[in-house]
Amino acid sequence: MIFLRRQVPLLITLITGIVFAAQYYVPHPASEQMLTSVTKWLQIIGGFALVLGVSSLFHVHAVKIRRKEAGWGYSFVLYVSMVGTIAVGLWSNGKEAVDGTMTAFGWIYNFMMVPLQGTMFAILAFFIASAAYRSFRARSREAAVLLIAAVIVMMGRVPLGEYLIPISGDLSQWILNVLNASVRRAILIGVSLGTIALSIKIIFGLERSYLGGGKE
Amino acid sequence: MSFSERMLKIDRRIIFLVIGVCTLLPLLYPVGLPIKISNEVRGVYDHIESLPEGSVFLLSLDFDPASKPELQPQAISLLRHAFKKNLRVVAMTLWVSGTGLADQIITQVAREMGKESGKDYVFLGWSPGGTAVIINMGQDLYGAFPADYNGKPTKGLPVLQHVANLRDVNYAVSLGAGRPGVEEWYVFGRDKYKFELGGGCTGVMAPGLYPLLRSGQINGLIGGLRGAAEYETLMDQKGRAIAGMDAQSATHLAIIVLVIMCNLFYFSSRNRTRLQGQSGAH
């Protein structure tokens, strides 16, 4: 069993890791055909992952409802909404509209999901304003620099700011293009090097946490 | 408790009210301040402008309804521009929750511009796999999307004539609200299949994409509502983005005033505490 649980996945990872890292540099038709087939598998696995995710969500919330854990009412709402949406979605053949006429699934999408998601995102503006008032204070030199940069960018990104302080637009562009881009690039390079190191460790079996820690 | 300390602990509902009023009033009474065009937005506009008639333009609407206020105006402007230039439009999404919204946007603009599905444009819909879809499209577009959103087989559609994979796309724009989005289209698409790529994103995401822009990995970036308003200005078509810019101006200014006020109260309260401490020591 250990062979199947440990050695086989490690071997598959080693072979596929090396083959597909090399594939990128080999434009031969056979190599391209192999990539085509494997990305199709990936798409199929992606579809199954969705089923797995939904069934896992069902399971977690069913347990919460059965045990009447704290906040089980929310789980019940989620359960009813999910079952209802899936049933209506199947009934409507997954289409929001047919020949320009809105289906029941389209109604749920347009009059429930769109406004709910929109509301969640919109209230962020209010919370950000409140949080900025409470915590955006120049307590140190670093915080003061951050504060000044934020004020300049906020002024420069809106017509009123550019109208009141004409230079704020150019200053904000400079902050975004020079200071922000260079720092972001440094972070990206660091993250990429870390990703390469981690990939090499996974390919050569040095990093095995993805195998899980089940009984052997 | 001093006045400064009281002001620092102001009821947050007052702040909510200020932001609400600053959003609502400019929407009811728009001012219409001039909008300056940035090089980032001009990059996307100029590239579409330079494309000859019949070129293949891929628009990936990688967002869900949460980002609708910022990204829908961008999508509408880009589609209007592409249709005006008689480009062949291939639209799709990598976000399953955005499929309905993407369909509505493309259907609405196509109807407005008198374009026909299958002939002038195609909406491919969503396919599972995230970034794998991009690679799969790069290898074989018909393998990734055997049928369009309406169930019509993609093979044989006049709009996809001579288009086998992403290498045949002349210009692609990803309007991303997260992952997968612009960055994934570069890493898994443009880097390997060598098509020109532009981006659009929400305001909070824009600073994170500047390294791609500065290195030329994307040739333009439409950032947030401001970017959408700039594109509407370039198209000379006033839409929701331009209408929303006054509200955004007012809320930005309100937040700046709040932050300055909070710092003034903070320093006043700190000085007071320090002076009290000194007098207590004497």
Image: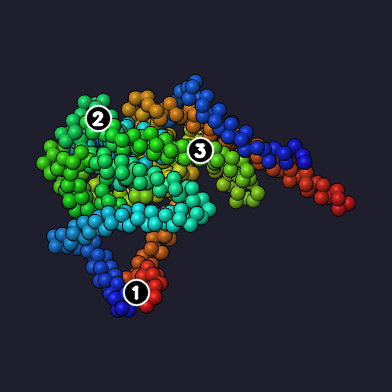
**x 65%, y 49%: residue:** A139
Residue B31 location, x and y as percent?
A: 48, 22
Given the image, what chain letter belongs to the residue carrying mark 2?
A: A
Report how far apart the C-alphas of labels 3 and 1 lie in the structure: 46 Å
Amino acid tagged 3: Ile
Please name the residue that numbered disc 3 is placed on: A123
Please name the residue that numbered disc 2 is placed on: A100
Sequence-first disc among 1 and 2:
2
In-front residue for pair B14/A75: A75
Residue B137 vs B73, above or below: the answer is below
Given the image, what chain letter belongs to the residue carrying mark 3?
A: A
Please name the residue that numbered disc 1 is placed on: A205
Sequence-first disc among 3 and 2:
2
Give the number of the mark in front: 1 or 2: 2
* SS state under label 1: loop
The image quarter in which residue A213 lies: bottom left
**x 30%, y 33%: residue:** B105
Residue A202 vs B93, above or below: the answer is below
Sequence-first disc among 3 and 1:
3
Report how far apart the C-alphas of labels 1 and 2 lie in the structure: 54 Å
* SS state under label 3: helix
Residue A173 in sight? no
